[in-house]
Image (cartoon, rainbow, N blue to C red):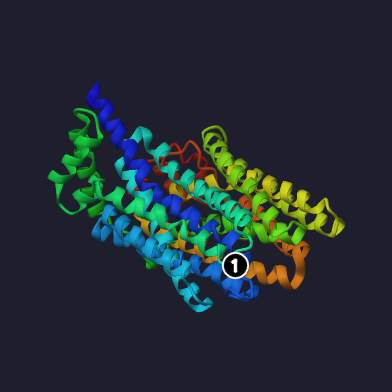
Amino acid sequence: MGKQRNYKSFLTTIIIVSTFGGLLFGYDTGVINGALPYMSEEDQLDLNAFTEGLVTSSLLFGAALGAVLGGRLSDYIGRRKNILNLAVLFFVATLGCTLAPNVTVMVIFRFILGFAVGGASVTVPTYLAEMSPVERRGRMVTQNELMIVTGQLLAFVFNAILGSTMSDNSHVWRYMLAIAALPAVFLFFGMLKMPESPRWFVSKGKNENAFQVLQKIREGSRAESELHEIEKAFAEEKEMEKASLKDLAVPWVRRIVFLGIGIAVVQQITGVNSIMYYGTQILENSGFQTEAALIGNIANGVISVLATFLGIWLLGKIGRRPMLLTGLAGTTTALLLIGIFSTLLEGTATLPYVVLTLTVMFLTFQQGAVSPVTWLMLSEIFPLKLRGLGMGVAVFFLWIVNFFIGLTFPILLDKVGLSMTFFVFVALGIAAITFVHKFLPETKGLSLEELELKFRLHGNQGEQNYLNKDESVMK
């Protein structure tokens, strides 16, 4: 019994320590929300609409590259070592941003910080998935999602506290950014005591090391049987030819990659990150003072955390398609109402409270339906052969679209105003609903093999009967 408690508590420690990578991801993407108004002041970085977008989105461009290279690097040097390197990168880049004397230095260090964010976005979930027992895998991996939104909430809370208590200090934004150095230190020293993934050890032929790790994180005889499973799975993968870009010539492969890109783009064009990055500006634009906007923005962080819990619970109850369509209908309606009320109530004392209520409504649908389905479907639609290529391309597109939205949102806000900016996102929301309705298949309740067969048979008469499959079709 004592041994069982030991392995469970060790697994819990692994989750807590490694998901600080997710917390840093959330904090560094959320902190800019409150820092921008102070950074923009004349005696600080003197930002205009374009440089505001550049400072925000440079992190996202770095994240796109970090996500692509982070996975490969963790395959080469190991998950644990890669997370250690990322912790150092988080720390150095945080200090660089905190001490930045001008826009150029800020953009360079935000790009480096983004590289760490992108690397963490692929390495931490991989590490968690490989350390967790199969029956706890879903729960362990979703802990990282929770840590990301918790990091954003913490950023909003610290922004509000510092903005309220130090509003007369023009360097307050530097304190907001500096806080991220603390979890980076914790992640580094915590990971020094964590073991390497047994899956990675097997991939490097270090099976004895893999067994030693499994003995610490599994009960009794499970360590040995799981080692054999990992060895078998790795041997099968080694024999299997991985997909490359030339495989896009095959129609069903092209269709799955197209759907993966579509799911990733849909999650971003709802405009979620315009609220996560520029929520304070949106509330300022609607009529709040900066301090009040910072405090109001905490509601966006709280609802993101609560809705993520709701989304995780709903995934087991509802089909992916209806959940995604409902989420998109909700986000698009919220954006439409923000656009309408921004015109009807312009200049009134009521408008900021209406806008805050509607951003909370938007995030309930986004974090409670759209985001959880996105990540789950991306992990479901790609067969093993295609997973590396498919996930890499989809996540790259997700970050690039995120980058363009981060760059253009303050420019749109400056040039066409709050109302028209949100009408642009309403049009994108309608396009997203159309895409999901027309192209996206239901994946709930199907094994990965059944899904692959469904895609292979798409457009053939046999698709309706794909479950009564002939084994030879799979070869």
From the viewer's perspective, tell me whether residue 220 is left or right of residue 190.
left
Residue at 51% across / 64% down in the picture? 174
Q: Position of residue 51 (x, y in %)?
A: 59, 75
Q: Is residue 230 above or below residue 239?
A: above
Left or right: residue 338 versus residue 174 is right
- At a point 55% along the width and 48% down the height, the residue shown is 153
Question: What amino acid is found at the position of numbered circle 1 in the picture?
Answer: Ser
Residue highlighted by disc 1:
170
Identify the image quadrant of the N terminus.
top left
Percent across and percent down for residue 408 are 63, 70
Task: Give the SS element for disc 1.
Answer: loop
Q: For this rendering, which residue is in front, 99 or 168? A: 168
The answer, for residue 443, to whether it is visible in the render is: yes
Counting every numbered tag in the picture gives 1
Q: Position of residue 31 (x, y in %)?
A: 54, 58
Dot 1: within a 10 Å radius of its alpha carbon, few (fewer than 14), some, or many (20 or more) residues? some
Comparing 264 with 78, the one in front is 78
**Residue found 57% across the figure and 49% down from its top:** 157
Side of 49 relative to 343 (left or right):
left
Q: Quadrant of residue 76?
A: bottom left
Residue 302 in the image, given as x and y percentages of width and height? 60, 43
> In the image, is residue 8 above or below residue 254?
above
Image quadrant in which you'd find residue 338: bottom right
Visible residue check, residue 472: no
Q: Quadrant of residue 108?
A: bottom left
Horizontal relation, residue 343 to residue 277: left or right:
right
